[in-house]
Image (cartoon, helix red, strand yellow):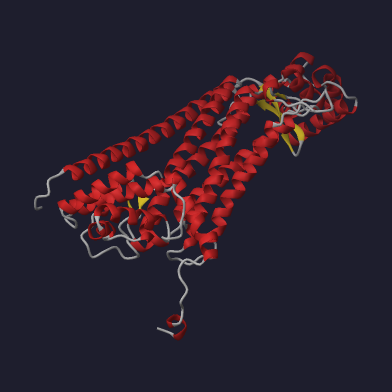
Amino acid sequence: MGMLQANDKSVFPDPVYRKTVLKPLFDGAKSHHADALARIDRAHLVMLVETGILDKRQGKTIARALQAMAREIEPARLNYGGDVEDYFFYMERELKARAGADIGGRLHTARSRNDIDHTFLKLALKPRIDALLAASRSLLATLIEAAHRDRDIVIVAYTHGQPAQPTTHGHYLSAIIEVLIRDMERLEAARGIVDLCPLGAAAITTSGFPIDRHRVAALLGFAAPLRNSYSCIAATDYLTSVYSALGLMFLHLGRPVQDFQFWSSFEVGQLYLPNAFVQISSIMPQKRNPVPFEHLRHLSGQAVGRARAVVDVMHNTPFTDMTDSEAETHEMGYQAFEVAHRVLELLTATIGAGRIDPERVADILNRSCATITELADWLVRTENLSFRQGHEIAADVSRAVVARAGDLKRDGYEVFAAAFREHTGRAPRAGKDEFQRTVSPENFVAVRDRFGGPAPAAMDAAIADYRTALAGFESRAAAHAAREKAAQAELERRMAEIAEMSNGAD
């Protein structure tokens, strides 16, 4: 012992340390992790009794004490007094008070706060992931129904902020659907990492006691134990995977929100949001402010930012057990889940309520000549021109129509005939009726019946696949829920049996 240590008469905890570290950690544990810690105690006890590490008398005494604690202690009402280090030691003290110091202290055999911490943090993460996936499935279902409903509803597709081509609202929503499916798959994959149980790693290297890690994992509803014991207390990829997946989901969802706000502007107006979602100005009575899109944009940004903060906290941390990856970082992450739910719920409602204004769409398409690509394609197919020659004729037509603020279907044929004659030296074979049919938005969509295109057959095939994907998400969620419900029932059954068993020798 060094001289400084020998002369140190200070008493733990220092008031500032208590205020800035211990009390916030205790309050966070009682709010977010009390139930998970209680489940860990029960599962560990069952395993200790089943393996013979504790005898029946010891197991019965501890089981009854834990049952009494569950009845008598309300974690939310606890106040940190500074007389114990943290919530774990508070509950251990309560157990010893009921079971006796010797027997109560035996529950901690073959475990450490290192493996306990990561286990209860994973137990707290899983239901949050499951709830977020459930809300994502609701959004996905709404998007699929809206895509089916609007399969044939033409919209203006924009690139670089300018009208580009017609497509359908269903086709546009299908693009969002496919990204959302991939985002949900990423979140499911992250859940798979969370679903591996660290308990039994103890401090670092497992234990000399004959513990059964598989049994504990099963009792807690995990898919399996995480194999490497060092990884159990050092690896944080379960944390970074979850929040990376969450952040990507809301980064991606924020992008179409930008489109929806643009589409609902007065100048564009192809998307109409009902009055129930529209706020008015306090001074300008003519204003219709579709503010849900603004809230969706900034809330998506908050979800991304909070998720990214969790990932960034892990940067340049040592590959060992450390507080950086524990409770307070997770509590910051829980805020990302909370705001993410707000986004999913509001976006689901606005997707379901929004409608395309066909008159505004038709006006923009005609004035912008956004179907002109099909004229160039059509010339290649019917007049045996090169695409570049067809493109030049179509460009002349669009420039002339836009310059006179005309309408492509109404005003375009004469310009087209002149441009065709100039470039080819002959008259086009097609008459005005065929020209008008060719440049119509409906024809533009109908001929694009390739895989992934907006034509009805391609869309029907896509929507069928999206429904299959949704069913897969629902099936996997149901399987997870059933496994965890069965684990909970098994844990409660075994605890009751241990609490009531005789004290005979094993």
The reply, left or right, for residue 305 in relation to residue 413 is: left
| Above/below status of 135 relative to 333 | above
Query: At 50% from the left edge and 56% from the top edge, which residue is drawn?
Result: 23
Q: Decide if residue 351 is on the left or right side of residue 162.
A: left
* Residue 70, quarter of picture: top left
Q: In the picture, residue 71 is in which quadrant?
A: top left
Residue 219 in picture, x, y percent from top left: 28, 45
Number of labelled discs?
A: 0
Residue at x 73% of width, y 28% of height: 264
**Residue 144 drawn at (x, y percent):** 54, 26
Q: Position of residue 416 (x, y in %)?
A: 83, 24
Inspect this view and state whether residue 190 appears.
no
Q: Name the residue at 54% across, 31% down.
A: 139
Between 116 and 350, the residue placed more toward the observer is 116
The N terminus - image quarter: bottom left
- Residue drawn 24% across the image and 47% down it: 63
Classify 363 as above or below 477. Answer: above
Residue furthest right as drawn: 404
Q: Position of residue 80 (x, y in %)?
A: 46, 54
Q: Nearer the viewer, residue 450 or 52?
A: 52
**In the current view of this chain or complex, which residue is farthest to the left?**
505
Name the residue at the top extreme.
433
Note whether 127 is above or below 325 in the view shown. Answer: above
Left or right, residue 308 beside residue 229: right
